[in-house]
Image (cartoon, rainbow, N blue to C red):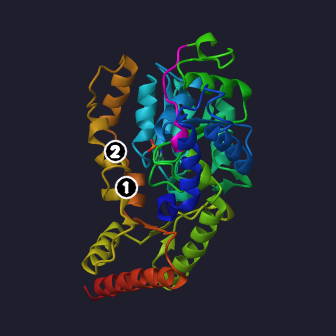
Amino acid sequence: MPGFELFGAQERKEVNEVLGTGILMRYGFEGARKGIWKSRELEAELCRQLGCKYAQLVSSGTTALTTALAVLGIGAGDEVIMPVFTFVASFEAVLSVGAIPVLADVDESLTLSPEAVRQALTPRTKCVMPVHMCGSMADLDPLMEICREHGLILLEDACQSIGASYKGRALGTIGDAGTLSFDFVKTITCAEGGAVLTNDPTLFEKADGYSDHGHDHKGVDRGADLHPFLGTNFRISELHAAVGLAQIRRLNEFLGIQRKNFALVKEALSGVPEISVRAIPDPAGDSCTFLSWFLPSEELMRAAVAELKEQGIAGGNMYWYEHNWHYIRKWDHLRGSSTLNTLNEGQQLGLRDLADTSYPLSDAIMGRCLSTQISLLWTEAQAREKGEKIAAAVKKVLSRSLVK
Ligand SMILES: *Cc1c(COP(=O)(O)O)cnc(C)c1O
C-alpha cells in the first residue's frame, strides 16, 4: 500500500539534486538553485497525471484541508458535513478554520451516505466533505446533486486515495477543491506533504498565497511581494517535494501492483459466501490500497479478528470499529471538546450536540467490517496465500458458530 515500501534509488537521486544546490526552500534564490524547482515540478506532474488545472503543495494533508477550507471561505458559524469514518485530520482542519464539523453516517461504501447528508443539512451548512476512504471512492453524483440543490461547496478529502477515480475523473479533482496527503503511510509518500487540487484559478491563487503568509508571489523578490490577505506558513520543503516527485512518477506502477494483489486476495475470499465486499461506486476507479469486507454480524467479525490474532496473521487487517483514530466511537477528545484553547461559540454548541449523538447505522456497518491492507511487496504467491489464510480462518469461525 504505501510508497515507503518501495523507496529507493529514484528518490535518492531527486533529493541529491536538491542537496547539490543547498537551496532547500521552494521559493526564491533563483540564481543559486540552478534551475532546480522540485515543488513546481511535482505540482505540474500532479496536474498532468490527475488531469486538473492547479495543484498547490503544502506541508501535509492536514494543512491541505485547512488551506482548502480557508480559501473556500469557510469559517466561524459555518457547518461542514463530514463522515463518522475518516482520519482525525478531517475534523481537526474544520475546527482550525473556526467552522463546525457535523458528523454524518457512512453507508456500505464506507464513505458519506448521501441520505445522511440530506438529514444533516441546516441553514448553517456551507460545505459537504466526503472522504474517499481506504483507496476507494464516495458516490459523488448524489453528493454533487445535494450541493447543487442547496448551493453548497463540495470539498473532497482524497488524502487516502490518490490515483483512484470516479467515472473517469481523478478523485480530488471533481469537487470545488480536493486534497491529497503524502504522509509516510499513504500510497505515495514524501515523509510529510500534501496538496490542494482545484480547477478554479481564483482558489488556486488564494491557496498559493495562503500557504505562504499571504505572499502574492508577484514581486521581483520575496521582500517585494504584496499581501492581499492574511495567510500562514504551510510550505513544503524542496527536500520533501523531491521525494514526492520520484514517487509520483511511480504512481502507476504502484497502482498496477495494488490492483493485481487486490484481485488475488479478493479471489481467495470469494470462496466464502458469508463474506461480502465493500460497495464501490465505480469499481474500475478503485486504487486498491485495501480490500474492505464484511461478515454478516459484529459478533462473527469479532470472532474472526480474534482468530486471525490467534493464528498470528492479524497484521495489516484493520478493524476500524476498535481503532483509536478512524472511527467516531473512539473520538472522545472530539466529543468531549478536549481543546487546549477556547473554541468559538458555534463550535462549542456543535460539539456539545455531538457528545450525545449515536450512530447506530454506521456502527452496524463498521462493526462488521475489516480492511485488509494490500502490500506492494507481496509476490503473487504471497498475495494468494494471504487471502487463503484469511478465508480459512473465517471458515473456521463460521463452522464454530454453526456448532454452537
Ligand atoms: C492522512 C489523512 C489526512 C491527513 O494527512 P497528513 O498528511 O497525515 O496530515 C487527512 N484525511 C485523511 C482521510 C487521511 O487519511
Is 338 in the magenta? Answer: no
Image quadrant in which you'd find residue 259: bottom right
Q: Start and end of the magenta stretch?
A: 230-240
The three-letter code of the residue at mark 1 reads Asp
SS assignment at label 2: loop
Image quadrant in which you'd find residue 298: bottom left
The first of marks 2 and 1 along the sequence is: 2
Q: Mark 2 CB in 8 Å range of ligand 1?
A: no
Q: Residues within 10 Å of mark 2 (few under 14, many from 20)?
A: few
The three-letter code of the residue at mark 2 reads Ser
Q: Is residue 109 above or below residue 42?
A: below
Per the model, the C-alpha gap separating discs 2 and 1 is 9 Å
SS assignment at label 1: helix
Judge by depth and name the residue closer to the eye, 383 or 183. Answer: 183
Q: How many marks?
A: 2
Please give the name of the residue rendered at 74% of the width and 55% of the height, measured from the top-left corner: 168
Mark 2, residue position: 358
Mark 1, residue position: 363
Is 239 in the magenta? Answer: yes
Q: Position of residue 392 (x, y in %)?
A: 39, 86
Are the two marked residues, 2 and 1, in contact with CB atoms closer than 8 angstroms? yes
Please give the name of the residue rendered at 63% of the width and 56% of the height, measured from the top-left corner: 164
Q: Position of residue 330 (x, y in %)?
A: 29, 48
Q: Is residue 337 above or below residue 246?
A: above
